[in-house]
Amino acid sequence: MSNRNQAQILLEPERYELRAAAPYRFDLDRREFFRFLGAGVLVVSILQSAGVAQESGGASRRRGDSLPKEIDAWLHLGENGKITVYTGKVEMGQNIRTSLSQAVAEELPVPIEKIEMVMGDTRLTPFDMGTFGSRTTPTMNFELRKVAAAAREMLIALAAAQWQTDPQKLVAADGKVTDPQNHRSLDYAALTKGQQLTKIVTVGTSLIPATSWKVSGQSASKVDGRDFVTGRHRYPSDQKLPDMLYGKVCRPTSFNATLVSVETQKAEQMGATVVHDGNFVGVAAASTELAAAAIAAIHAEWKSEPQASSKELFDYLRKNTVAGTDVTGDGDQFDVGKVDQALGSADHRLQQTYTVSYIAHTPLEPRAALAKWDGDNLTVWTGTQRPFGVRGQLAEAFRIPEDRVRVLMPDTGSGYGGKHTGETAIEAARLARTAQRPVKVGWTREEEFTWAYFRPAGVIDVSSGVRSDGTITAWEFHNFNSGSAGIRSYYEIPNQHIVFHATKSPLRQGSYRALAATANHFARESHMDEMAHAVKMDPLEFRLKNLKDERLRAVFEAAAKQFGWGKTKTPGQGFGMGGGYEKLGNIATFAEVGVDRKSGEVKVVRVVSAFECGAIVNPDNLRNQIEGSNVQGLGGALFEAIEFENGKILNGKMSEYRVPRFSDVPVLETVLLDRKDLPSAGAGECPMVGLAPAIANAIFDASGVRLRSLPLVPNGLKQS
Amino acid sequence: MSIIRLSVNGRPYTVDAEPKTSLLTVLREHLDLTGSKYGCGEGQCGACTVLIDGKAQRSCVTPVGSISQRPITTIEGLASGEQLHPVQEAFLDAEAMQCGYCTSGMIMSAVALLQRNPAPKESEIIAFMDGNVCRCGTYPRIVRAIQKAAKVAIASSAAKGAGR
């Protein structure tokens, strides 16, 4: 695994990234574009996977005036000089509205404030699978740079034609094409006036190398930051339409329940619109309070079967493996050499089990949607990472064609992988259809804790063999349920047997920031420490001895230097590390903890992260993402866990489910390694994966207590 | 329903609502002041924070009938025209946000803190702000923003003093 094939990793399927391609992609008419956008210059880029589609016969020949089907982004230069970029990606705090604007500003080139980004609107933007998997920077950022560069070439060509001069002698900068020799210039608006030109990005378009970047590679402030500090930005839950009603849904008393009977007269008498359709019972009313009162007045009886509880969770997962549900293919098993033999002949053998709990994303903005019908046409504003996926869900739920559904995604109050689905969109649309008025549904925090989905829980069994000189010879790794992201080891081990086992899940589960990479890195990097101790080697030295990958070695070494690895510690103090690569990024995290053995209190005092994700696009935002990953990661590492019993969540409130707060935050230090020679990768997920093992290893270092379950210390460190 | 008079951001309002209705609901649904956010409904996350008589209050657990004529300030009332409040400026400078959903509550809490304690120590900032949740984890930046806003406010009041 030391020679990483980037393309392969990019395409590696991930079990819990809910995704689906559009079932059809129809021809786009060039004339339609200009009718809609106005005259000017249009530049489109074609999906990276279009070549694959063509090989498999997926793309058809084009009509004379149509554009390719597989467009993933486009840019329009209006004849008034307005620059509009269209992408199906969405903004939820990862700051891509800014970083993608930087990419366009760099290549066009034009001041960043001249660019308008239209994002995540299924009517206006090209199809996009969704915003997940840290793919915006390696894919969309790259595509938009190509689009903007192609636009620049086209503008230079237009100017050259007008001046009848050699395009090589012209320069595009600051929204103008200039002829330096003849001291003349034309702004982009003058060049696009009256044009109806299209260009499809070709491989020949030359991009500005990262070493010459002026806008990308620099810290840029959030382009619409002012709207957030003034409260002006309208999130999905802030959307409003005239005559709008507020919707609320009658929830079952437990998961997987069926409705036995329901009484709704009282709610109707209160003036609410009541909808009872199969298992769905909901109301729409003039205010949220009236809607809540109407729901309270509904008497519903539900029936359900007994269900597993969190107390028996890990036993349950082990005993409930399922065969034949392998949707991800070869990511699930990896074999090399002969593990049994190698384990038998190893100087030291270790066998341990690690577990992770279900945790809740807890996006500060709970799910919300506003739905409006115009005849058979449905428009929904909602907070989702997959506007096109939600469009498909709505089309399916209401048995209408996708082209009658428009989903818009106003920049939402975070997602972290938790907003792939369209629950509130469907609920609001169902209520709006009967009410014949727009309806908004905003989930309460309790609803978000209960009816969204969770990060998968998991059990991981590791068996290893190591020689006395610290060479790892055998590695057997079984992951039950948590997922296959990051399941492979980056250490050089000649004999490996790695398997992901799908199991039944007592709770609804799905994608979560960094997916199973958090669980797999926790198990692997904790076990690395255990092996290092077994052979009495320094944990850093042990890792480096078994690691060839240069990029990963570089982050471990950089973090160790910043942290001061090897310094002496005081009683109660502990140092630990964890790291790895995920989503094309490389992370090493070093943690210092303080453990008070009397009170059991564990405090994470300091965290040093070294991160490398190729050429850095926006250094300050990158730091922000790494800091955020560490702060959010503290929760899952130390105390977050969903407790449940027989189909009910037991701690589904902010007062009962502890999330990291100001007082939990350690000193955070970030070392950025900028590799301008490598393509830029995303950073929203990878930096999280090193934290939990670094803390667990530091707790061991401080106390001699080895913790193998996440969360590590929900009730402090127990006396042993 | 009852007729309730409120003073929000220096403007008088009359709303027809149940006295037990939360101030947050009235602000968002009746007055269309959506800058204050719903996050938890139990005063645990601070996204709904407004100033009542200059004090930070969780509007999601404040019955609208309990306020009477005490002045309410929301995030929409903090800037004077296009001139941002120093705390708003400091949040922009420190890039103290990601998704921004907690931002208005953070800013309102910070304004209340600085009114009470113009030069808070880091530990005092952390203690005062601990009831505000940022799920994106921008806490260290928010602390820096508050420290910066405090410095700016002290410098500007010193400048005013010197000019007298």
Image (cartoon, helix red, strand yellow):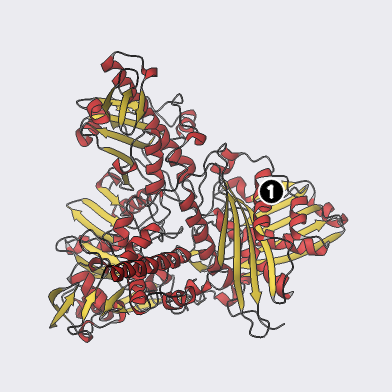
Chain letter of the residue beneath label 1 in the structure image: A
Q: Is residue A22 above or below residue B46?
A: above
Residue under label 1: A553
Give the side of residue A205 with respect to residue A483, left or right. left
User: Is residue A161 visible from the viewing direction of this image?
Assistant: yes
Q: Residue at x 44, y 65 (%)?
A: B144
Q: Is residue A228 above or below residue B68?
A: above
At label 1, the amino acid type is Arg
Judge the density around disc 1: few (<14), some (14-19), many (≥20) Cα neighbours within 10 Å: some
Q: Quadrant of residue A177?
A: top left
Is label 1 in a helix, a strand or a loop? helix
- Which residue of the protein is positioned furthest toward the top in this rendering? A164
Q: Is residue A242 above or below residue A444?
A: above
Q: Quadrant of the N terminus of chain A?
A: top right
Foreground: A652 or A391?
Answer: A652
Give the side of residue A375 with respect to residue A224, left or right. left
Q: Position of residue A260 (x, y in %)?
A: 35, 75
Give the side of residue A617 with respect to residue A696, left or right. left
Q: Residue at x 34, y 18 (%)?
A: A181
